């Protein structure tokens, strides 16, 4: 039985995710590996031994190479450490811009263009960036975007201040939007435009 248009598109997304995550560009080999593994892109990547699923990612489609994730996390942590040292005000502004630029470039490289990772941003930067993302999504005609803030597991009080600040900002200053916590992932916000 031939594949429907939707099934073909889904297959292409899985192949693209495996190519991007593994660096292997042989479409035939990837299609065969997907067929052998029940069309499970994550399992194919695990078999290649170079991948982990990005936390909060869509299963089977949105995969990241371990090196890509670690490089992003290291860059963000290095910039944050510089910020925590209490630099001069002009240096602080420069470091905040650098942190925001790193987050932007990471999100632009992702497979999904409605899901944005705000991990490692300061609360103020995350709120500013979230507002920018909402405006960009509105211009693109998107109805919903997902903001990955983290659940607060690494926060001193166990509460994600970034998530609370973004929810408050949207609730009180963007009445045309609706924001809720994803019931299946406490570290993700669903913003309906």
Image (cartoon, rainbow, N blue to C red):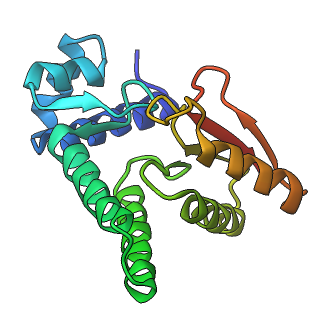
Looking at the image, residue 125 lies above or below residue 90 = above
Residue for point 9% across, 40% down: 26
Identify the image quadrant of residue 181.
top right
46, 70: nearer the viewer: 70
Residue furthest to the bottom in view is 90
Residue for point 44% across, 73% down: 96
Residue for point 62% across, 44% down: 161
Q: Can you give x and y, in whole percent of width and height, for residue 32 in the image?
A: 15, 22
Looking at the image, residue 187 lies above or below residue 43 = below
Q: Can you give x and y, in whole percent of width and height, for residue 102 in the image?
A: 35, 65
- Say whether residue 80 is left or right of residue 133: left
Asked if residue 20 shows in the view, the reply is no
Identify the image quadrant of residue 16.
top left
Looking at the image, residue 108 lies above or below residue 188 = below
Q: How many marks?
A: 0
Quadrant where the N terminus lies? top left
44, 85: nearer the viewer: 85
- Say whether residue 91 is left or right of residue 29: right
- Say whether residue 28 is left or right of residue 64: left
38, 88: nearer the viewer: 88
Residue for point 63% across, 68% down: 132
Q: Can you give x and y, in whole percent of width and height, for residue 33 in the image?
A: 15, 21
Asked if residue 31 shows in the view, the reply is yes
Q: Can you give x and y, in whole percent of width and height, for residue 105 in the image?
A: 36, 65
135, 84: nearer the viewer: 84
């Amino acid at each position: 039985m031939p594949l429907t248009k939707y099934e073909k598109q889904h297959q292409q997304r899985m192949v693209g995710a495996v190519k991007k995550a593994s660096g292997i560009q042989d479409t035939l080999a990837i299609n065969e590996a997907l067929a052998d593994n029940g069309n499970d892109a994550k399992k194919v990547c695990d078999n290649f031994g170079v991948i982990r699923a990005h936390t909060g990612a869509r299963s089977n489609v949105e995969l990241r190479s371990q090196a890509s994730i670690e490089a992003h996390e290291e860059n963000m942590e290095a910039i944050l450490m510089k910020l925590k040292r209490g630099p001069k005000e002009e240096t602080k502004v420069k470091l905040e811009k650098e942190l925001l630029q790193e987050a932007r470039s990471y999100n632009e490289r992702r497979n999904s263009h409605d899901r944005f990772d705000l991990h490692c941003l300061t609360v103020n930067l995350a709120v500013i960036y979230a507002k920018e993302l909402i405006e960009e999504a509105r211009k693109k005609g998107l109805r919903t975007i997902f903001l990955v803030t983290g659940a607060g597991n690494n926060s001193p009080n166990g509460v994600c201040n970034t998530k609370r600040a973004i929810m408050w900002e949207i609730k009180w200053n963007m009445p045309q939007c609706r924001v809720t916590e994803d019931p299946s992932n406490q570290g993700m916000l669903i913003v309906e435009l």
